[in-house]
Amino acid sequence: MGVLGALLGGVLVAVAVAEPAPSPSPSSPPPPPPPPHLLAEVLSCQPDAPSLSLSVTLDGRALSWFHFPGSRWIPETPELPPWPEGLETPGELLPETQMCREILGILGKQLGGLLPQARGIPVVSVFPARPPSPGDATTALVCLVQNIFPPSLAVSWTVAGAGVTRGVTLGPFVPNPDLTFGRISRISVTPRPGDVVACVVTLGKDNATTVVAYWVAPDTALDEQLDMALAGAALALGLVLALLGLGLALLARRDPHG
């Protein structure tokens, strides 16, 4: 049912927007046209949670997504402007969601057991949201999950083997051009040097499949010691080269013909 809910029961609306081409000079050949931007709105429905998802993307990057329990549009990042009022209100989305569920029910009965289920193995990676700053003990980490299909999985975090829920945010499922989905989870932690932070991705109702990605907190004290050692070695090498140059200069003055 995962392939029927996410693929056959989905509604895709895409609009290609091309940038205006600059006017070429008479002596030069016309430049190739720039690639068009793709503005896509994807609605999917499936038996598993979340039963409904709706996202608006530009060139594969999420702009806004619709929160069905709260009946409101939410921008992907706080820097983006809010969804315009009066544009695709919850009442206008109701017929589309009903049609998606009706298609899912019809195809589920007719094609159940005839088509194999399409499932993707998630690709998970964990990395800092920004380079660490000296003296900053808190680290913001990002867990990027790609190649999701169908869009149904759970994301959790552990720090030094203990589960963590405070400071965790979970984004929506974002559709990709290859008909898979992506999802991002963020966490703010204050780890000790050497602590292992894990992003755990669990698939299926019975939690049968788990994919884990790790990040190890660096030891800033060792980094500072290494920086001091490298600086000392560079200073010592500079002094040796300076003394060698001074000795060669003195020899040249004593023997001008040599």
Image (cartoon, rainbow, N blue to C red):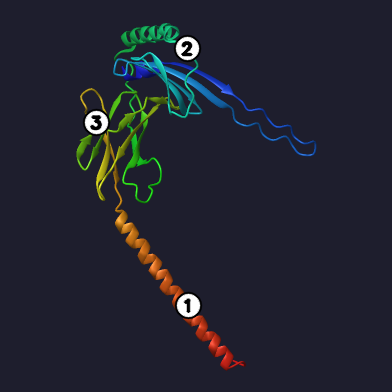
Sequence-wise, which precedes: disc 1 or disc 2? 2
Can residue 176 be spotted in the picture?
A: yes
56 relative position to 3: left or right: right
Indicate which disc residue 228 carries: none
129 relative position to 207: left or right: right
Q: Residues within 10 Å of mark 3 (few under 14, many from 20)?
A: few
Name the residue carrying label 1.
Answer: 241
Q: Amino acid at mark 1?
A: Leu
Name the residue carrying label 3.
Answer: 209
Q: Residue at x 52, y 19 (%)?
A: 14
The answer to whether residue 165 is above or below residue 192 is above
Q: Residue at x 58, y 90 (%)?
A: 253
Tell me the quarter of the image containing the N terminus: top left
Can residue 177 be spotted in the picture?
A: no
Where does residue 188 sit, x and y in percent of width and height? 31, 38
Picture quadrant where residue 155 is located: top left
Taking the view exactly as shown, the residue that stands out farthest to the right is 26
The answer to whether residue 164 is above or below residue 57 is below
Q: What whole-number distance in Å separates the C-alpha atoms at marks 1 and 2?
A: 72 Å
The answer to whether residue 159 is above or below residue 87 is below
Where does residue 186 sit, x and y in percent of width and height? 34, 34
Q: Which type of secondary structure does the marked residue at label 1 adopt?
A: helix
Picture quadrant where residue 53 is located: top left
Q: What whole-number distance in Å separates the C-alpha atoms at marks 1 and 3?
A: 60 Å
68 relative position to 238: left or right: left
Q: Which type of secondary structure does the marked residue at label 3 adopt?
A: strand
Name the residue carrying label 2.
Answer: 88
**Disc nearest the viewer among 3 and 2:** 2
The answer to whether residue 163 is above or below residue 105 is below
